[in-house]
Image: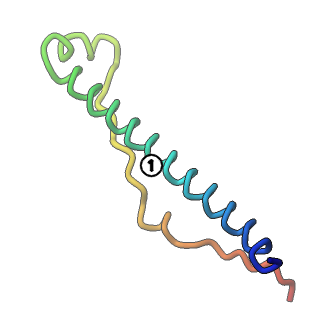
């Protein structure tokens, strides 16, 4: 019984992290979808005539850099 209770916080933490990852992924997809729609609208008539007047420019999609996948050093031991 004690071993089961000790593993519970790890399980809760991993579930919370998975929910966070899912939420971040969903928001990234929503952002990229909105950028796609925006870029399409200002590229078509009449948006392509109005966009330069207001300074609207094509936007880039969110893409994580390869360097963002490198894990940071989290060693807290002092030497």
Q: How many marks on residues?
A: 1
Q: Residue at x 20, y 26 (%)?
A: 40
The answer to which of 34 and 3 lies nearer the viewer is: 3
The answer to which of 11 and 26 lies nearer the viewer is: 11
Q: Which residue is disc 1 drawn over?
A: 25
Secondary element at image label 1: helix
Dividing the picture into quadrants, the one containing residue 13 is: bottom right
Quarter of the image with the N terminus in it:
bottom right
Across and down, in percent, residue 12 comes to 68, 60
Q: Residue at x 32, y 35 (%)?
A: 33
Q: Residue furthest right?
A: 78
Quarter of the image with the C terminus in it:
bottom right
> Counting other residues with Cα less than 10 Å from the Cα at mark 1, is it few (<14), some (14-19), or many (20 or more)?
few
Above or below residue 33? Residue 67 is below
Q: Residue furthest bottom?
A: 79
Q: Left or right of 79: which side holds 51?
A: left
Q: Left or right of 57: which side holds 64?
A: right
Q: Left or right of 35: which side holds 7?
A: right
Across and down, in percent, residue 31 comes to 40, 36
Q: Residue at x 50, y 63 (%)?
A: 68
Across and down, in percent, residue 8 comes to 73, 67
Q: Residue furthest left?
A: 45
Above or below residue 13? Residue 24 is above
Q: Residue at x 61, y 59 (%)?
A: 15
The colour scheme applied to this rendered structure is rainbow
Above or below residue 47? Residue 37 is below
């Amino acid at each position: 019984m004690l071993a089961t209770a000790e593993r519970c916080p790890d399980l809760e933490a991993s579930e919370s992290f998975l929910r966070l990852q899912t939420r971040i992924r969903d928001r990234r997809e929503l952002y990229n979808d909105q950028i796609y729609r925006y870029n399409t609208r200002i590229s078509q008539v009449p948006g392509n005539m109005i966009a330069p007047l207001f300074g609207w420019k094509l936007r880039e999609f969110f893409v994580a850099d390869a360097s963002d996948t490198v894990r940071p050093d989290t060693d807290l031991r002092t030497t």
